[in-house]
Amino acid sequence: MSEQTVIVGFGPVAARLVDELLPAVRSGQVRLTVVGEENEAAYNRVLVADLGVGRTTADALALADAAALAGDGVDVRLGTRVRRVDRARQLVILADGSTVHYDRLVFATGSRPVIPNLTGINPDPTSPVLPAGVTALRDLRDAGVLRQAVAGGKRVVVLGGGVLGLETALAAAEEGATVTVVHNGPHPLGRNIDRGGGAVLAAGLRRCGVRVAGNARSTGVEHNAPDGGFSALLLDDGSAIDGDLLVLSCGVRPRSELAEGCGLSTQTGILVDHRLRAHHEPHIFAIGDCAEVRCPDPDCTDCRNAKGPSGLVGPGWRQAEWLAEYLGLLAAGLVEDAEALPALPPEQAGVVVLKARGMNMAVAGDNSADPWDDEALSAGAVNGRPRLQIAQWADPEHGRYVKMTTRGGVLAGLVSVGMPRTAAELVGLFERGAELPADRSLLLRLDGPDQLPVTADPQGTVCRCAGVSGAVIQDAVAGGCATVPEVSKATRAGTGCGGCHDDIRGLIEKHFQAVPAA
């Protein structure tokens, strides 16, 4: 008899799991039910801001077709909330009182936006309802609110200096809105970037038409608009930043309340082992933003310094692919337990890339030490030679900055602002764990005026979210794909954060330039 698998949540990570399980569903080995709280099937939430400024369409964001899945035998339940999980009877209890039995249950509940504690915003933390003129830019309806503001050339205030907030601000400003970014710290991206890179980044934002209000502590919002909506963000120094729309971009928090409610172990997210199993519960798994990989073994060195969920779509997709393989083998009777499979490989340190027209930035690894930090440089010295070394270069007038941190010659951290070719090379070296050239200035020369236009490395990874190399993209183009959407459909490249679209486009153009005219 086929196994019943239930997936709670229908976001991008769940969509990948469903996609990978379809062969087992079609063959009758797996019966699959997907429960989604939203009325829409899975879509690319990362690109909601692009939808909000009119750069893409809802159809282009779609990652699943509910009708097609139903035709394949998947029980898709949209607009349906799960009330609780009964582990003893292996039942998922829905809000309408109906139940769904499971042999395997997968939590793919993702995360919810962090709503700051501001006077004038008092939402229920489990189901936030924000006042008029305030949005967390999380779903398709939020995108519609932003679209109205941008189309009307309104004043948009973005609270939060993270990547998504900055990308939203830059896109909205370019499309005609008056935009202010408000953040608590000396510069944007305070958790990722060093002081020098942050200063150059802030200056670049201003050149792109985005006002930046740093070291600003917000305390409340005013609702004096004619419709009773948002009119100003209040700061602790008594000043106010007027606006017509407030976009909250203050991070996300894993949605683990259902897991907590049925007695599963949670910390930042739902605790799972290296095979994505919930602690002490072999029938339940968690993937994506809600899952925190931290096994119960106190002697596991990989988990000792593990952090919570990354918040990135790429790791979630890799988890979905691994879990789909296991569930498929289990249903086919080819394995009896997850121990029979290799553990999910640990994720490498992520690369933060700012994707915006007129701005180029890449950050990865640990960039906290300064070139003159004797204590940090002398720690772990070998034979009197510092193990930690730092090279730094800045040209604030032209908005360019590079910092390279190496340990034993291997690149361990990087900051690159306004240097696209250098950034591409450094990211490749960082992902390969490669040593830098002895003469670091060679990397800076990549952005010199005598260099050829930057193109993606066919041998390197072009799409980090989906793990697609340039060679795979080139093969797809040679096979007839002539646009970014066609390449995305054939290879999944570009279906995540969208930061690789220009690289994909460059490979397409390079191919057709080399093809002789008929």
Image (cartoon, rainbow, N blue to C red):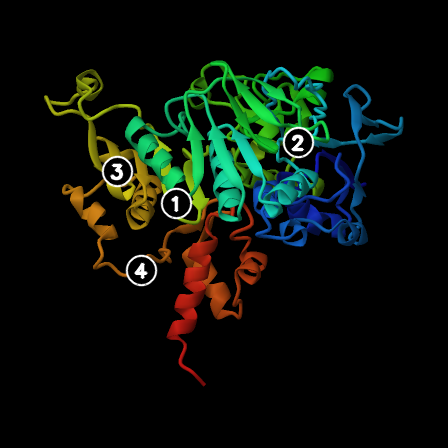
- Foreground disc of the pair 4, 2: 2
The kind of residue on which mark 2 rests is Gly
- Rounded to the nearest angstrom, the CA distance separating label 2 from label 3 is 36 Å
Residue drawn at (43%, 24%), measured in percent from left and top?
302
169 horizontally vs 291: left or right: left
Work out whether residue 250 can be spotted.
Answer: no
Residue of label 3: 396
Residue of label 2: 133
The kind of residue on which mark 1 rests is Met
Q: Is residue 490 above or below residue 86?
A: below
Residue drawn at (47%, 36%), measured in percent from left and top?
166
- Foreground disc of the pair 2, 3: 2
How many numbered marks, from 0 up? 4
Q: Mark 4 touching mark 2, by CB under 8 A?
A: no
Estimate how packed mark 2 is, as few (under 14), some (14 to 19) or many (20 or more) residues with alpha carbons within 10 Å. many
199 horizontally vs 517: left or right: left
Estimate how packed mark 1 is, as few (under 14), some (14 to 19) or many (20 or more) residues with alpha carbons within 10 Å. some
Q: Mark 3 touching mark 4, by CB under 8 A?
A: no
Mark number displayed over residue 453: 4
The x and y percentages for residue 254 are 60, 25
Quadrant where the C terminus sits is bottom left
| Picture quadrant where residue 246 is located | top right
Q: Residue furthest right?
A: 97
Mark number displayed over residue 359: 1
The x and y percentages for residue 178 are 52, 39
Quadrant where the N terminus sits is top right
Q: Camera-side residue: 434 or 253?
A: 253
- Rounded to the nearest angstrom, the CA distance separating label 3 from label 4 is 23 Å
Mark 3 and mark 4 lie on one chain; the one further toward the N terminus is 3
